[in-house]
Image (cartoon, rainbow, N blue to C red):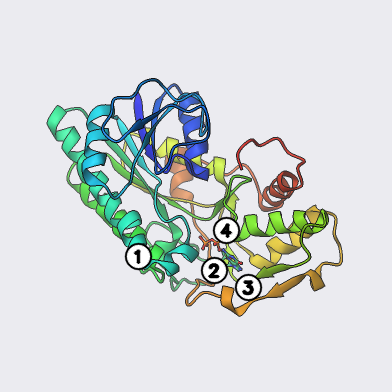
Amino acid sequence: MARAFVTGITGQDGSYLAEALLDRGWEVHGLATSPPASGASTTPAGMPSASPASASPASGVTIHVGDLTDAPFLASVLDEVRPDLVVNLAGISSVAASWADPVRCAEVTGLAAVTLLELAWRLQERHGIPVRWLQASSAEIFGQPKLAAGEAISERTPIAPVSPYGAAKAFAHVTTGVYRTRGMHASTVILFNHESPRRPHAFVTRKITSTVAAIVQGRADKLVLGNQDARRDWGWAPDYVEAMVRAAEHDRADDFVVATGVAHSVGDFVAAAFAGAGIRDWASLVETDPALVRPTDPAVLVGDASKARAELGWTPTVGFEELVARMVAHDLGHSTDSAD
Ligand code: GDP
């Protein structure tokens, strides 16, 4: 395999994935909705690329600028790039945003994924060269599963989303299975929450670490949150990207849960972040705003990654405390992670 085409290349996962693929010798092309920061070469819709991009999201990536919902544009880019692997990371990136615009979420996260999958399939059929597909699926496709005590979500858990985001992701997930049955090497990685200093501020982890840093530095006086009892299985994003690469390169296409298997509450994250910043008496600094509580919100999402461990040899390398410490250190200006 040689050439990868990655949607959502400018996001947290896209930037780490581009770096991981380049390290392994892949040629990397990415789709972005707007031109990346200064220095990068880009190819407008349908135009041949002038030269490889030389700046963010990762040096050596060729960026194609266009809209994921523009099917003719996607078709022309795929024809031009002729990838061996298509990784679909793009979409409305958060559950919170999907509640604000469910229709746009369905178009971008659901329908566009299937459009791209069909285009990848046609490319394979036309040229007789295998095109692999990897869909970034999500724990949100399972909604609020009924599990036995201590049981974690696995690939066998029934799909029953409870948010517009989960529903759109579920559509892309099951359609990936349809194309696998059709004979394509089409896999999903079912990603549980995965965080890093590159996480956008719309996610609770980054909101917490950036606000705690702002409080320490006198730029904010309160941390205002929604549901602090929600429990999530938070892992380190570069670990999850490693699972993506392994799934894409694996002999057999399949669905793989990618998770740490350990859940913590939002409140636990808050406590760890203040501890990491050296603040002891923080209770009065945190408030709840009912407007931030979601219409439906899974109480616990924890994943069982046994299959990824057994078949892909994958294992998470960064635990909860270390993850929080790294994000707080970054937001305090103490770390060297470049992207933000
Ligand atoms: P998600 O699990 O993909 O939706 O990731 P988020 O980081 O957006 O949310 C994780 C959990 O934090 C959910 O249960 C949210 O309801 C909860 N949460 C509590 N307060 C907030 C907040 O202020 N912002 C966000 N984004 N989530 C919050």
Judged left or right of residue 207, residue 132 is left
Element carrying mark 4: loop
Closer to viewer: mark 3 or mark 2: 3
Residue 109 image offset from top left, x and y in percent: 35, 55
Secondary structure under tag 1 reads helix
Residue at the disc numbered 4: 203
Question: Mark 2 or mark 4: which is in front?
Answer: 4
Spatial CA distance of label 3 from label 4 is 15 Å
65 or 178: which is nearer to us? 65
Observer-nearest of 50 and 118: 50
Q: Is residue 115 left or right of residue 261?
A: left
Between circles 3 and 4, the one closer to the viewer is 4
Could you tell which of marks 1 and 2 lies nearer the N-terminus? 1
What is the distance, in whole Å, between disc 1 and disc 2 at their CAs? Answer: 18 Å
* Residue labelled with disc 1: 167
What mark, if any, has residue 300 been given in the picture? 2
Give the image location of residue 202, x and y in percent. Answer: 56, 58
User: Does label 4 point to a residue whose CB lies under 8 Å from ligand 1?
Assistant: yes
Q: What residue type is disc 4 on?
A: Phe
Q: Residue at x 40, y 44 (%)?
A: 33
* Dot placed on the residue nearer the N-terminal end, 2 or 4: 4
Sequence-wise, which precedes: disc 3 or disc 4? 4
Q: Which comes sooner in the sequence, label 3 or label 2? A: 3
For label 3, the crowd category at 10 Å Cα-Cα, with few meaning under 14, some 14 to 19 and many 20 or more, is few
Whole-angstrom CA distance, mark 3 to mark 1, is 23 Å
Q: Is mark 2 within 8 Å of ligand 1?
A: no
**Which mark is on residue 229?**
3
The residue located at (61%, 43%) in the rendering is 340
